[in-house]
Image: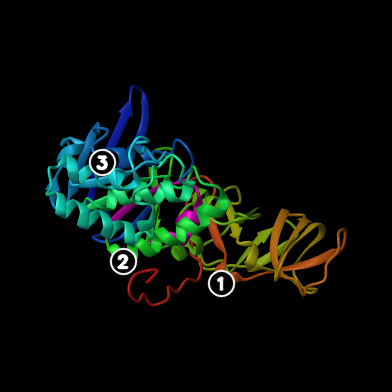
Amino acid sequence: MAEIRIENLKKHFGDFVAVNDSTFTIENGEFFVMLGPSGCGKTTTLRMIAGLELPSEGRILLDGEDVTFNRASQRDIAFVFQLFALYPHMTVRRNISFPLRVQGMARREVRRRTEEVAKLLRIEHLLDRGVGGLAAGDRQRVALGRAIVRQAKAFLMDEPLGALDAEFRDLMCEELRLLHNRVGATTVYVTHDQIEAMSMADRICIMNKGEVLQIGAPMEVYARPATRFVAGFIGSPSMNFLEAEGGLPAGAREIRIPGARVPMPETREPLTSRNAVLGARPEHITIRDDGPLRGEVFAVEYMGARQMVTVDTPAGRLRVRAPNTVAVDYGENVGLAFDAERLVVFNAETDRSVASTLFEAPPVQGGAHG
């Protein structure tokens, strides 16, 4: 297993900048997820790590070795593609063992490692079946097995669950994380699905328009987004945004929004009336009779123990996550209160956070998901 270090990595396709000056380190044994919308540069970055694309500038180090311009075959990595890329004329056993047979490994060792991996993935009963008739989840396990059997320094996965339906995807998220915990391999996983990222990652790297915006543990990027884009991309539904009025002078303890004044955390820089934006997660807004901001209930969505209440206010339409014990009806006038310690303030001109929310990470025991 190995540390992967990215230094000032850039990739241009003509005038288009796919990756712009990325620098970060993926720790040995870490499950590192690259998250962002289509076209943000995450897959291009993964392909450069794999050796399938050459960077325009920068360096890639694998276990301390500069592999920037090495061919893919010269890097000790295993790649799992979105479309399983299995050999349809081969059995499960021969698909999994293919990388070992190409290397000329002894037949007995090939058999041992193939059966060991199949048992790990719980597909040992499928070893002598063809892959064509397998369910999608089993085909994905075969693709994973072919990568794992190599015992490479790092595993790279490009949206490997994208072709699965929702039920299989949820199951495979859990199994992939458990598999990672057992194998302990350095894993780089690309996805545009925030639920996959939040449920599996030790750390998430969020990208947009070729740039790395924030890297952190799932709880951290959710609670302390570095930019407005991150705040809106992480979370379902996303963070509510409210424009401030009257500016935020240094040391201000309140932020004025249309219809109310809201306590706020201390900002790191003063902002004018034109460039301050308040961010509030739906669960950090409470429906209360004495709430300073009032509005009319637009919609109520019941979600088991919780409900999502949409309220039209002078500050805009807000989503509120509330217990189902709170009785509200369409058209009702309600008050809204904000959890000041968990609000975020953004500079609208730069989109960057200028006030952090309260966040205390729990102690890590045996890995972030151990």
Q: Residues within 10 Å of mark 3 (few under 14, many from 20)?
A: many
Residue 182 sits in quarter: bottom left
Query: Counting residues from the N terminus, which is met first, the one under dot 3 or under dot 1?
Result: 3
Which residue corresponds to the image point at 28% horizontal and 36% vertical from the top-left?
10
What is the three-letter code of the residue carrying label 3? Ala
- Depth check: 176 or 108 in front? 108
Asked whether the viewer can see residue 264, the reply is yes
Quickly name the residue at label 2. Answer: 182
Q: Secondary structure at mark 2?
A: helix
Answer with left or right where residue 177 lies relative to residue 304: left
Answer with left or right where residue 333 lies relative to residue 183: right
**Dot label at residue 50:** 3
Query: Counting residues from the N terminus, which is met first, the one under dot 2 or under dot 3?
Result: 3
- Depth check: 60 or 116 in front? 116
Q: Secondary structure at mark 3?
A: helix
**Dot label at residue 341:** 1
Q: Compared to 337, does 153 lie above or below?
A: above
Is label 2 in contact with label 1 (beta carbons under 8 Å)?
no
Q: Residues within 10 Å of mark 1 (few under 14, many from 20)?
A: some
Identify the magenta region: 185-201
What is the three-letter code of the residue carrying label 1? Glu
Which residue corresponds to the image point at 32% horizontal and 74% vertical from the top-left?
366
Q: Is residue 198 magenta?
A: yes
Q: Is the image coloured rainbow, by chain, by secondary structure, or in one colour?
A: rainbow
Query: Counting residues from the N terminus, which is met first, the one under dot 2 or under dot 1?
Result: 2
Which residue corresponds to the image point at 34% horizontal and 46% vertical from the top-left?
92
